[in-house]
Image: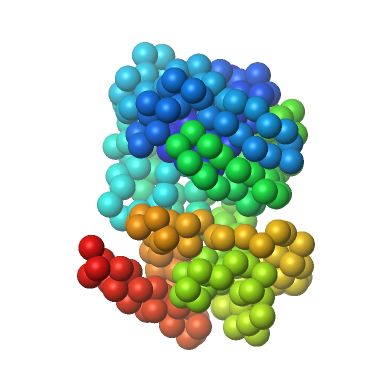
């Protein structure tokens, strides 16, 4: 299995390292950490062990790849200013499957339109992991994955990808309704990511002191999913609350990006959800408030630059 990881931050570095552990040939496209990763690899600290992931090749851009991979795995942030299709186009061959391990809802259409004749595998990571320094990744908890063909179905390539991750020691599930799975993950993301920023930097354990608000946001996400024809399990909110209580105090990815002055995935996580609700005629006052407050928070941060 030949894999190219595009976006070698916390998610890309961690899951690329796991695929390499499973025996895949893993190369990476690395921008900000290029020199460190090329010379020293990526150091992983995890309950699964501590090791250094040394990619088969390290590139500055996908166009440097000489042989098209079996899978191009996109792990960049989903931001309006990032043209994901352009980032990977030169590496995508006739038999390349495109894999997204990214946050947000309704994020696949851009890639589906750009590569109509390629298999598009949408994926979700349920993990507490962060990049602590150039070439340094800390995995704290969880790590499970879900994959499915977009817009629906399970293919042999999805199954092979899941099997590779299973060999590396993490649970990887194939699902025929990856769109529902995305809304399922948004139940957590839409609540905890923006609240971690708006609260001034609180970790998940402190955010749970406002459980009523969190549950209200989660219920609105469930209502959108149901209106779009992807109803979520009745216990999805209870499961998310319980799993958050079990995890160590965690700074969300959005909070880490905010504190580092990086762009935020506000549109992918909140904006897309609010727009979907408007199309479906679903009332989501809590989501709309969080979205507006996050846009104001971003404006305030930009005004200080």
* Observer able to see residue 302: yes
State the residue at coordinates (36%, 55%).
262
State the residue at coordinates (67%, 48%).
140
* Observer able to see residue 158: no
In the picture, which quadrant includes the C terminus?
Answer: bottom left
Instruction: Find residue 240 and report its horizontal and vertical position in percent.
Output: 70, 66
Given residues 121 and 44, the one toward you in this image is 44
Side of 37 where 140 appears, left or right: right
State the residue at coordinates (41%, 14%).
67
Side of 130 where 270 appears, left or right: left
Side of 131 where 45 appears, left or right: right
State the residue at coordinates (30%, 23%).
63
Instruction: Find residue 290 and report its horizontal and vertical position in percent.
Output: 45, 78
In the picture, which quadrant includes the N terminus?
Answer: top right
Relative vertical location of residue 30 with respect to residue 224 in this rendering, above or below:
above
Given residues 28 and 52, the one toward you in this image is 52
Q: Residue furthest top?
A: 66
Relative vertical location of residue 183 with respect to residue 210 in this rendering, above or below:
above
Quarter occupied by residue 187 = bottom right
Side of 233 where 219 appears, left or right: left
Relative vertical location of residue 102 with respect to residue 206 in this rendering, above or below:
above
Instruction: Find residue 93 and report its horizontal and vertical position in percent.
Output: 40, 22
Given residues 167 and 178, the one toward you in this image is 167
Instruction: Find residue 189 and report its horizontal and vertical position in percent.
Output: 55, 64
Picture colour scheme: rainbow
Quarter occupied by residue 47 = top right
Q: How many marks?
A: 0
């Amino acid at each position: 299995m030949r894999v190219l990881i595009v976006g070698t931050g916390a998610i890309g570095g961690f899951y690329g390292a796991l695929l390499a552990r499973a025996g895949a040939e893993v190369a990476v496209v690395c921008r900000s950490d290029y020199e460190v990763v090329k010379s020293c690899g990526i150091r992983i600290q995890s309950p699964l062990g501590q090791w250094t992931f040394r990619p088969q090749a390290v590139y500055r851009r996908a166009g440097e790849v000489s042989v098209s991979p079996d899978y191009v795995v996109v792990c960049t942030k989903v931001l309006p200013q990032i043209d994901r299709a352009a980032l990977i186009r030169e590496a995508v061959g006739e038999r390349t499957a495109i894999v997204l391990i990214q946050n947000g809802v309704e994020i696949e259409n851009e890639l589906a339109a750009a590569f109509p004749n390629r298999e598009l595998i949408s994926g979700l990571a349920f993990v507490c992991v962060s990049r602590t320094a150039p070439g340094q990744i800390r995995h704290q908890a969880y790590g499970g994955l879900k994959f499915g063909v977009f817009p629906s179905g399970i293919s042999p390539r999805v199954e092979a990808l899941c099997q590779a991750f299973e060999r590396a020691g993490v649970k990887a599930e194939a699902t025929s309704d990856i769109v529902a799975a995305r809304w399922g993950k948004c139940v957590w993301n839409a609540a905890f990511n923006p609240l971690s920023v708006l609260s001034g930097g609180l970790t998940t354990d402190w955010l749970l002191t406002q459980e009523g608000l969190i549950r209200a946001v989660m219920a609105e996400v469930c209502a959108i999913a149901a209106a779009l024809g992807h109803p979520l399990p009745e216990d999805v909110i209870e499961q998310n609350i319980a799993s958050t209580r079990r995890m160590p105090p965690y700074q969300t990815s959005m909070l880490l990006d905010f504190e580092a002055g990086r762009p935020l995935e506000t549109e992918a996580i909140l904006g897309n959800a609010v727009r979907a609700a408007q199309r479906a005629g679903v009332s989501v006052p809590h989501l709309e408030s969080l979205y507006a407050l996050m846009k104001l928070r971003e404006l305030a941060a930009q005004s200080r630059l």
